[in-house]
Image: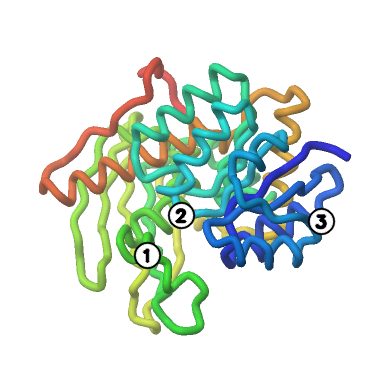
Amino acid sequence: MGQRFGLLGTGHWARETQGAALAAHPEAELVGVWGRDPAKAANLAAHLGTRPYEDVDALIADVDAVAIALPPDVQGDLALRAARAGRHLLLDKPVALDLDVADALVAEAGVRGLASVVFFTHRFSDNVDTFLRTAADEGGWDGARATLFASIFRSDNPYGASPWRREKGGLWDVGPHLLSLVLPVLGPVEEVTALNGPRDSVHVLTRHRDGAVGSFSVTLDAAPEATTFSIDLYGEPGTRAVPGGDRGAAVAFGSAIDRLLDQVAGTPGDPCDLRFGREVVAVLTAAEESVRSGRTTRVTEAAGSDPAASR
């Protein structure tokens, strides 16, 4: 059997995506499940054919890597505990709600030589990967326009009761997906201007290092007839729609497991590693501060980053 994984979390995403992919992966041994509710952990463990753990540190001690399907404020602290124990990290987006926690995760992973992957769902479909690589190589893009309007606060939506989504809204939930598809083409963001709009929407302007400008609108509370997910690049090559992923979430998560295992086997880094996850958190943090202050906000660079570098 390959690498031993522990799954932290017991919700819909843990069951249908991360847990399903880990249980099916030929090179991953799902050692156990931990959750904040022991009864739910026992139920999910039985469903996945593994054992429940009541002590998260005991599970961390028994594995080589952790996959975390928990709210980002909970994920950040548990990921730090796992990293300090020398465990590889397969995290969900955003990696944390606090930039200091994201910075600490990057530092721990770097010092300990840990593999890391952050699961931005669409980035683990080959069609999206090919599109982004081609667009980045082509260059000449002046910017991007995007509207990500979801409507999750309905009885039939498994994420509608999520407290952190109600508190942080579309900026922190669908915003990471958007940034994961734009940053590889337009490059790092230097400053952000953002404001609130109707239906808990946030409207964001990003100025990227090479001069491109992004214009993004997001919400989780759109009118049901107004839901949309569109991202378009524009510039010298014309206008190009960024495609959606061609894989379901569980299949895409299987690719994330593959990429983590590739790093463990010696392949250096990953386009969606903790450093990229931290970059996304820095942009979201700047947007949130801009909304609060009513001013354009600089994005905090990672310690030791090269100002001349471009993704």
Image coords of residue 241 (percent x, y): 50, 58
Residue type for callout 3: Ala
Kind of residue at badge 2: Pro
- Give the percent coordinates (x, y) of residue 2: 84, 37
Closer to us: 135 or 41: 41
Q: CA distance from mark 3 to mark 2?
A: 24 Å
Q: Nearer the viewer, residue 116 or 59?
A: 59
Which quadrant would the N terminus be assigned to in this image?
Answer: top right
Residue at the disc numbered 2: 71
The image position of residue 186, as x and y in percent, is 42, 38
Would residue 234 be seen by someone viewing this image from the given angle?
yes
Residue visible at 34% across and 40% down in the picture: 98
**Amino acid at circle 1:** Pro
Within 10 angstroms of label 3, few (less than 14), some, or many (20 or more) residues? Answer: some
Q: Nearer the viewer, mark 3 or mark 1?
A: 1
* Quarter of the view holding residue 76: top left
Gap in Å between the C-alphas at discs 3 and 1?
Answer: 30 Å
Where does residue 253 sit, x and y in percent of width and height? 67, 52
* CA–CA distance in space, label 1 to label 2: 9 Å
Disc 1, disc 2: CB below 8 Å? yes
Q: For the point 38% across and 69% down, which residue is it? A: 149
Location of mark 1 (residue): 163
Pointer 3 with pointer 1, Cβ within 8 A: no
Q: Is residue 242 left or right of residue 33?
A: left
In terms of secondary structure, where does tag 3 sit? Answer: helix
Residue 24's label in the rendered image is 3
Which is more N-terminal, label 1 or label 3?
A: 3
Give the answer, above or below, for where 77 lies relative to 109: below
Residue found at x 30% / y 61%: 167
- Outermost residue, left side: 294
Question: Dot 2: few (<14), some (14–19), or many (≥20) neighbours within 10 Å?
Answer: some
Q: Residue at x 48, y 38 (%)?
A: 277
